[in-house]
Image: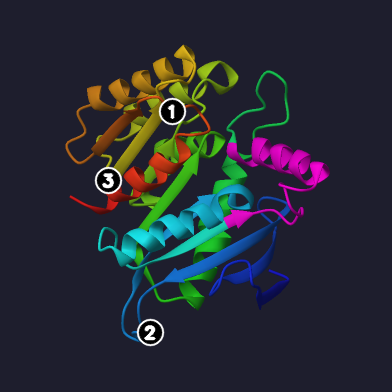
Amino acid sequence: MTESRTQAVLPGTDFHLFTSAIADDEFEVLIAPLRRADDQGKRYPVVYAPDANSTFAWIVHTAGTMMVGGELPEMIVVGIGHPIGSILTEPAALQKFFQARTWHLTPTAGEAGGGGGAEKFLGFIRDELIPFVDSNYPTNPEDRTLLGYSYGGLFSVYALLNNPEIFDRYVAGSPSLGFDDGVIFQHERASAASRPSLPVKLFMSAGSLESEKTLSNVEQMVEALKGRNYEDLDLTSVVFPDETHVSAIGGTLSRGLRAVFQG
């Protein structure tokens, strides 16, 4: 980490600039404690979310509103982004965003190359970011959530299958499971062969207007996980009617967080 300061990204949000030795990259980490009062003795669940350049504000407002409405507990939201500028106003920043997320959120290089950094990115989260957050914020180390969408959803599934013990709750919205010829299904088979237990809550979703291949892949992954008969896997899957890959984000955030925190 090279810099820590408070920045007015959102009111009450802390800004930290990390240089990761594991992922060999620089990250903007945004941390929003969503709590009604400063209770010195209380510890809070933490939601970790990649793609913070595009989704952090959306996640914070959704979770915060649901918290006020009594539908979610108080929590700390950690957004993992990149110091690239505004993806809404700067074309160069948007291109850097796509390049960075393709590299960090995918398990292999893929057909067009440019991917394959998921293992190192997960190592950064596990060995560098989580210890920092746990040391500087009132976290509950036994209650962590990973929330990802699209490539981020693929990364959520990758983390679940390779290091499920890092997080207790997983949200995988419209996961790009077809990436590199569906290589993530190889990870699923290897995971099933190596562990009889998967004690997590998982929410997986897609929009009904997404491609048939995307919907088929999500259905296939859901059925594969259910078919393993993990007694301790709590799996919820939803296909949102009349929603596309883009428009299903809102439903994924609200329904996904509610599914993994309630029940």
Between 132 and 211, which is closer to the camera in this rendering?
Answer: 211
> Label 3 near label 1: C-beta < 8 Å?
no
Closer mark to the observer between disc 1 and disc 3: 1
Kindly identify the residue that appears in the image at 24 percent across and 26 percent down: 226
User: Hey, what amino acid is under mark 2?
Assistant: Asp
The numbered dot on residue 175 is none
Residue sitting farthest toward the bottom: 40
* Other residues around mark 2 within 10 Å, as few (<14) / some (14–19) / many (≥20): few
Q: Work out whether mark 2 precedes mark 1 in sequence or the reverse, and give the earlier one.
A: 2
Tell me what residue is drawn at x 40 percent, y 40 percent: 252
Report the side of 148 relative to 114 (left or right).
left
User: Label 1, on which residue?
Assistant: 243
Which residue position holds label 2? 38
* Residue 195, horizontal then vertical, whole percent: 30, 35
Quarter holding residue 194:
top left
The stretch of residues the image draws in magenta is 80-105
Left or right, 2 with respect to 234, comes to: right
- The answer to whether residue 89 is left or right of residue 9 is right
The amino acid at mark 1 is Glu
Secondary structure of the residue carrying numbered label 2: loop
Q: Relative to residue 174, is residue 120 depicted above or below?
A: below
